[in-house]
Image (cartoon, rainbow, N blue to C red):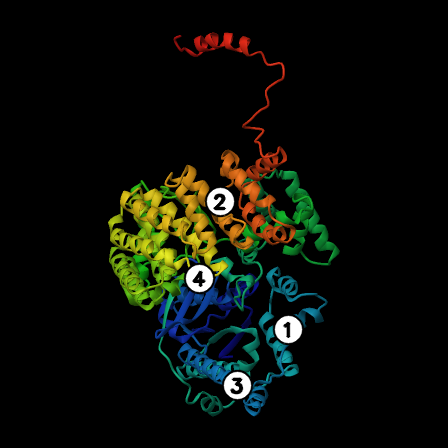
Amino acid sequence: MPVTILGIRHHGPGSARNVKSFLETLQPDIVLVEGPPEADPLLQYATHKELVPPVAILAYQTDNIQQSVYYPFAEFSPEWQAIQYARKANIHLRFMDLPLTHWLAIKEEEAERSRTQKEDNSTIQQDAFFEETATVGFTKSPFQYLAEADGFIDEESWWETMFEHRLNNEDIFIAINEAMQALRESFPKQHDREEELREAWMRKMIRQAEKDMFQKIAVICGAWHAPALSNMPKAKEDNDLLKGLPKTKIDCTWIPWTYDRLSLHSGYGAGIESPGWYHHVWQHPTDDGTLWMAHVAALFRKNGMDTSVAHVIEAVRLSESLAALRNLSKAGLQELNEAALSVICNGEPFMMQLVNKALIVGNRIGQVPEEIPKPPLQVNIEKIQKSLRLPATADYKDYMLDLRKDNDLARSIFLHRLQLLGINWGTKSHVSGKGTFKEQWRLQWDPSFVINIIEKGVWGNTLEEASNAWLVHQCHEETALGQIATLLEQVIPADLSNAAQAIAQRIQDIAAATNDIIQLVAVLPGLAGVMRYGNVRKTDADLVRHIVESMITRVCIGLPNACCGIDEATANKLTEDCSSINHSIQILQEKEYLDEWHQCLMKVAYLHHAAPMMRGFAARQLMDTKALIDEPLHQLFYSSLSKALPVSDTAAWLEGFLKGGGTLLLIDENLWMIVNDWIQQLDEDSFIQALPLMRRTFSNFTQAERKKLGEKAKNGGKNALLLPQLASNFNKDRAIKSIPVIMDLLGYQR
């Protein structure tokens, strides 16, 4: 027979072993594999020693890079074994699926039709759409029907028992073809144009191979397609179906893949539940579970859990007993998991989560040779990764960077630049201390990052060039001052001088043109932080100095008026932002800034039309810096808590004043008495009105402060810790006589 159809299920060691064995027996002169014909040039690298699975063919639309498709391969994938056989046997090898140049163009047209359909609210058109897309097909996987017919609950356990564990699968492909034929006849799928096009193209490729005079043609395809390729219609029918297909431009490359992305939970349609387990079955087909349990035990020991050889022996015995009870030839993953849970994990399911992540799914990542054509930006990023010794791994890897070390500083700059391009390989964790020399990063590589790299490649051939160009573009597209200021904060740790200068100029231009002081107040703390802590990274803090100086002056001039005529929510937000500004100015320790800020706060504190919370906040800051003390402070306190004022205003003023903490009320008796007298003079209705505001104010205090304030109120306004009661039998004369002795003990001369 010139054409042999091998129907397989993607990514299974049993199918892969069957395909490899069958091809070695058949010895065809051409192998056709279900896959994109655009990737045929990549097959020359299939036997390269540095192309180590899991890997994937990435195909993307050149004018819309996010429109992309992945074709993953593991070592135990039947398609991979077929490719390996053809390359090593030096015979012809072709992909035969519907070209992506047509498939992606069809998907784009369908998406456009879908958008048009959503915009059209015509009932007639909606009914026509639903009639057109109605199908009679499967409600579950076709393999599930076969599993249930054979007495299995799910298709995974059925497939594993029938194919992955069996070493003798003579005539298996004939059986699969007949089973799929029966399913297709029982459940005909209607109006599935995509599947019809794919199968028509596959038949076209088979006819082309026959036309090229190949005598033995081996076809590797999904089991569902096998009957459609065995019973071929007339060529004219397929040609008519394929006539006039749309086109788009496609490019392809090899990329590393991971077992995590090969699993079902990643969203991969042809994914499997246990790629790590299948890798083990492929490598050790005769293992009775002993080696697998040894891996489980080693994993637990590595994580500090006591596991003995006796645990392994008993777990293997239990798995074999379970398999015998279920009439299975050998223990599968389900039996091994149940045995491990009972014997090694002592019935604790959470311990099996570690086994699932590290062994059942696995953290293996593939490798791609450097010779494979790649975009310049990807080449540059990989070169930097290698020079900085930051390998791409499928599992998490933590790094604590010390920015005083050159290599760690270079790593930090590299990771920040990737983040700015939307390539979130690293996640930065909080490290205590502002302006610290330490950074904590957690890295985990995702194969989909390659798409982002290719997409951003239009902005430059190197990471620095692309990052600068992309951020300059972003800052000119953005109109909100806060967002642009955030960009500047992100650019400084990435050491992008060109982008930083462009963004700084953009901030200055927008700030000069805006009259919204509240917006400037919100932006200023971040810029002050850049100015203060930029030199931690050896960057030029003067880059934003002139912007900060200009904005501080404008804020100090405009803030008093901005505090007038605002609602409670705006006042609360403005108070928080001004607190950040105050903190920043105090840290900068520039006398000119401090003087301007204190003059501004003095105006706000005495401005009767300003929001009460802002007036209270201004008074507190002036008191903390000794700009407002003693009698003027007490007068301002009395006037702001006057009975003549609305209770809501006085409570808001007090909330703004106490935002710095409650310790002040503990140590200043005069202020305590003023607040205490104000509360006592409130009538019942006024007290009920003020209570929610007071509770909100005191909720911001620490637990220790609230406790001491409660004790002080309980003692009638006296702090028992600060003013201890004297004993009634205290002898003053005797105490005076002890003073010289104490002075001698302390080393003081009399």
- Identity, as a three-letter code, of the amino acid under mark 3: Met
Q: Are marks 2 and 1 in contact (CB under 8 Å)?
A: no
Sort mark 1 into few (<14), some (14-19) or many (20+) by Cα contacts within 10 Å: few
The residue to which callout 2 is attached is 638
The residue to which callout 4 is attached is 565
Spatial CA distance of label 2 from label 3 is 97 Å
Quarter of the picture containing the C terminus is: top left
Pick the front one: 484 or 142: 484
- Identity, as a three-letter code, of the amino acid under mark 4: Gly
Label 4 or label 3, whichever comes before in sequence order? 3
Sort mark 4 into few (<14), some (14-19) or many (20+) by Cα contacts within 10 Å: few
Left or right for 460, reference 732: left
Spatial CA distance of label 2 from label 1 is 77 Å
Q: In terms of secondary structure, where does tag 3 sit?
A: loop
- Residue 595 seen: yes
Q: Is residue 212 above or below residue 444?
A: below
The residue to which callout 3 is attached is 232
Labels 4, 1: front one: 4
Q: In terms of secondary structure, where does tag 2 sit?
A: helix
Q: Are marks 2 and 3 in contact (CB under 8 Å)?
A: no
Label 1 or label 3, whichever comes before in sequence order? 1
Spatial CA distance of label 4 from label 2 is 23 Å
Labels 2, 3: front one: 2
Spatial CA distance of label 1 from label 3 is 27 Å
- Identity, as a three-letter code, of the amino acid under mark 1: Lys
Label 4 or label 1, whichever comes before in sequence order? 1
Q: Residue at x 39, y 59 (%)?
A: 562
- Per the rendering, the mark at residue 140 is 1
